[in-house]
Image (cartoon, grey):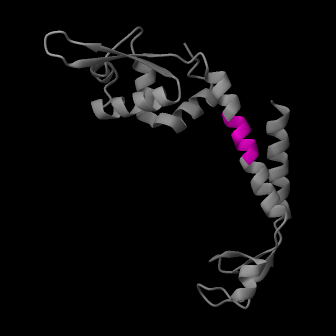
Amino acid sequence: MVDLNDKVIRGYLMSLVGEDGLKMIEEMPEGEVTDEEVAAKSGVLLNTVRRNLFILYENKFAVCRRERDSNSGWLTYLWHLNFSDIEHQLMREKKRLIRNLRTRLEFEENNVFYVCPQGCVRLLFNEATETEFLCPMCGEDLVYYDNSRFVEVLKKRVDALNSSI
């Protein structure tokens, strides 16, 4: 079983299924169980359990087996959790985050920004020229925005994530 006390794993699962989903995972019985059994054991609403199980299934953390009742023809879904691939998923997520941060860093480094002193907007230089350096919301004069601190923070974050790969 996965260590749900690990803050990285807990945070990742929380981003996938939320607080109710995390509660459901913590209370889920071992072996194959129905969604009704999971709902009864965890105290989470049945619809929420079903939604979270399908989210986990899409992310390859839940395995589902269908069983047909020979008398009624009804399908029963039997679920069990499998977190054996979570490290690989976390690494993929980290690489995606690094890619997004690099894209943002490149955007921040290659553009000049102007902001409204009232905090209404932040515009690219071209957009600021179109509004004649006046805030389109309140009419204040736009001022140059030095984003060098933000660029440094992005660089440090990318470096920190790269060093832990």
Position above or below: 20 against 66: below
Q: Quadrant of the N terminus?
A: top right
Query: Which residue is located at x 62 percent, y 86 percent?
Result: 136
- The magenta stretch spans residue 94: yes
Image quarter of residue 142: bottom right
Percent x, y for residue 143? 77, 82
Nearest the viewer among 146 and 34 is 34
Q: How many marks?
A: 0
Query: Which residue is located at x 13 percent, y 10 percent?
Result: 71
Magenta region: which residues?
93-99
Image quarter of residue 27: top left
Percent x, y for residue 36? 27, 21
Position above or below: 130 against 111: below
Q: Is residue 140 left or right of residue 58?
A: right
Position above or below: 115 against 73: below
Query: Which residue is located at x 85 percent, y 62 percent?
Result: 109
Q: Is residue 29 left or right of residue 132?
A: left
Position above or below: 96 against 124: above
Nearest the viewer among 79 and 139 is 79
Q: Is residue 70 left or right of residue 118?
A: left
- The magenta stretch spans residue 63: no
Query: Which residue is located at x 20 percent, y 19 percent?
Result: 74
Q: Is residue 67 left or right of residue 54?
A: left
In terms of secondary structure, what is the magenta stretch mainly?
helix
Percent x, y for residue 41? 32, 18
Q: Quadrant of the C terminus?
A: top right
Percent x, y for residue 62? 47, 21
